Image (cartoon, helix red, strand yellow):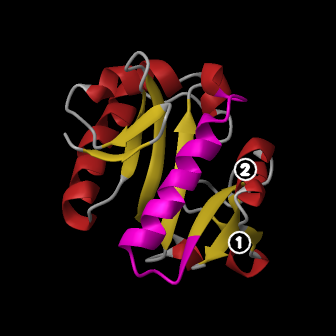
Amino acid sequence: MSVAIETQRMRLRGWRDEDGDAFVAATNTAEVMEHLGGVEDPAVLKAAVARQQALLAANGYCFWIIERVDDGAVLGFCGLKPGEVGPIADEVEIGWRLRADAWGQGYAREAAEATLDWAWANLDAPRVVAITVLGNVRSWGLMKRLGMRRRKDLDFAHPRFPPDHPLSWHICYAMDRP
């Protein structure tokens, strides 16, 4: 699988068939999944392999696997996908999910900055959007540090959750093309 982006510390690359187990082991924890609905059935997360491979084949981008250069460890994912829900449907959405022991080390920011650079160089999208829940301070904090701006007009109730669920309301940040 070819590498989409490489930085000094990591590679962002397409998903290999065997990435499912490493991705589940790295990210299917109560801490990582707290703002995503909780720990999932591993089969559900392993299905991400085929979804991301299909996105890459269809669009030339996906939520790429983050692989640490030093040891090849899977740290999670970061990348782009077509928005699928609410007011961000058909927008270019950036997203990330990293294993907890990689938090606070700058990996998410490094991967997101490299992803945004790739987006501006390779796509003609007028903006890139990102979503999270209000309680996910780490995620929207990174959005702000990346230079994204809150777009309350794009906030929405995510259809994955019942309207009264604490994870239903999603907030949106956006960055216009530089």
Residue 35 location, x and y as percent?
A: 67, 41
Q: From the viewer's perspective, is residue 39 above or below residue 114? A: above
Residue 159 appears in which quarter of the rendering?
Answer: bottom right
Secondary structure mostly seen in magenta is: helix
Q: Which residues are magenta?
A: 103-128
- First of labels 2, 1 by sequence position: 2
Q: Which kind of residue does numbered mark 2 sit on? A: Leu
Near mark 1 (Cα within 10 A), the count class, few <14, some 14-19 or many ≥20, is some
According to the picture, the residue beneath numbered tag 2 turns out to be: 142
Q: Which mark is residue 155?
A: 1
Whether residue 36 is visible here, answered yes or no, is no
| Direction front: furthest residue | 8
Q: Secondary structure at mark 2?
A: helix
Taking the image as shown, residue 89 lies to the left or right of residue 133, namely left
In magenta stretch: residue 173: no
State the quadrant of the N terminus: top left
Q: Which mark is residue 122?
A: none
Q: Which residue is depicted at the point 67% across and 28% down?
A: 103
Q: From the viewer's perspective, is residue 99 above or below residue 89? A: above
State the quadrant of the C terminus: bottom right
Q: Which kind of residue does numbered mark 1 sit on? A: Asp
Q: From the viewer's perspective, is residue 164 above or below residue 12? A: below
Q: CA distance from mark 2 to mark 1?
A: 17 Å
